Image (cartoon, rainbow, N blue to C red):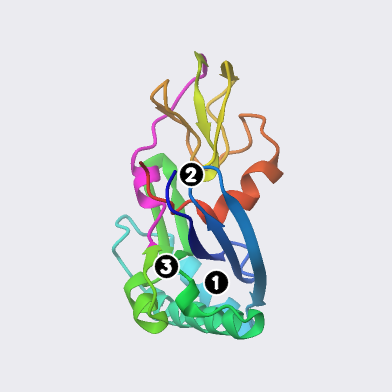
Amino acid sequence: MSKPLTALGLMSGTSLDGIDVALVTTDGENLVRRGPSRTYPYRADQQALLQDALADAKAMTDRSQRPGCLATAERELTEWHAAAVQSFCEETGVSLSEIAVIGFHGQTVLHRPDIRLTVQLGDGEALARRTGRPVVYDMRANDVAATTTWTGGTFSNATLRLGTAPIDHTAASTTWASNIGPDFTTVFNGNVTVQPNAAPGARWPAWWARPRALWGWWPAR
């Protein structure tokens, strides 16, 4: 069993409603101890900048590009997240020194798994400098780059990892009827990666995957 770590997860979803912050202590395997959480809503001007970033990202073909307002949006977004971390610590009494790592998802501005391209704004190194804590970021690129299509099948003793979470569900037999599934679903024993963000094709309820979204940064063993 790994040594438990306390992690702070940051999420800015495509709804553009705000920044979600959640604390969890986990060993990445069995122990899960949920801490406080907060949501910091975006102001109208912040939402407008992100809307512009979504529009400017539509023509991107290289995830390192920052056309139009994207460079500005990335800097601002990183600062907003740093402010959210500070507010969270002040409101909850959690000290930054208690946080072993920060998981920084960033803001998705383009997601094209059909061409293996996904773009999330957020400067992890800048956030680490602002908070003084290690930051894990740019989490989705490898998953999307490894995505392959699948026409369906049945795999005995398959292990299903939901939302790239460190918590697996193992079943004697796992069956899908199509090539759709929850985010970053992988059949390890079957060596199959289902396209992310398609739909809950594996028939697992949404509430199973959703609370684990902020833990997807946990290093693979």
Which badge, 1 or 2, comes first in the chain's sequence? 1
Instruction: Measure the C-alpha gap from mark 1 to mark 3.
Output: 13 Å
Q: Which of 150 and 186 is in front in this view?
A: 186
Image coords of residue 119 (percent x, y): 40, 58
Quadrant that contains the C terminus: top left
Quadrant that contains the N terminus: top left
Say few, some or many: other residues with alpha carbon within 10 Å of mark 3 (under 14 / 14 to 19 / 20 or more).
Answer: many
Q: Nearer the viewer, mark 2 or mark 3?
A: 2
Which badge, 2 or 3, comes first in the chain's sequence? 3
What kind of element bears circle 2?
Answer: helix
Seen in the picture, residue 101 relative to 171 is either above or below; the reply is below
> Is residue 139 shown in magenta?
yes
What kind of element bears circle 3?
Answer: strand
Say few, some or many: other residues with alpha carbon within 10 Å of mark 1 (under 14 / 14 to 19 / 20 or more).
Answer: some
> Is residue 140 shown in magenta?
yes
Seen in the picture, residue 199 relative to 128 is either above or below; the reply is above
What kind of element bears circle 1?
Answer: helix
Image coords of residue 211 (percent x, y): 64, 52
Seen in the picture, residue 189 relative to 26 is either above or below; the reply is above
Q: Disc 3 designates what residue?
A: 121
Image coords of residue 156 (percent x, y): 51, 13
Residue type, label 1: Gln
Residue type, label 2: Thr
Q: Quadrant of residue 169?
A: top right
Residue type, label 3: Leu
Q: Which of 138 and 215 is in front in this view?
A: 215
Instruction: Measure the C-alpha gap from mark 2 to mark 3.
Output: 20 Å
Q: Disc 1 designates what residue?
A: 51
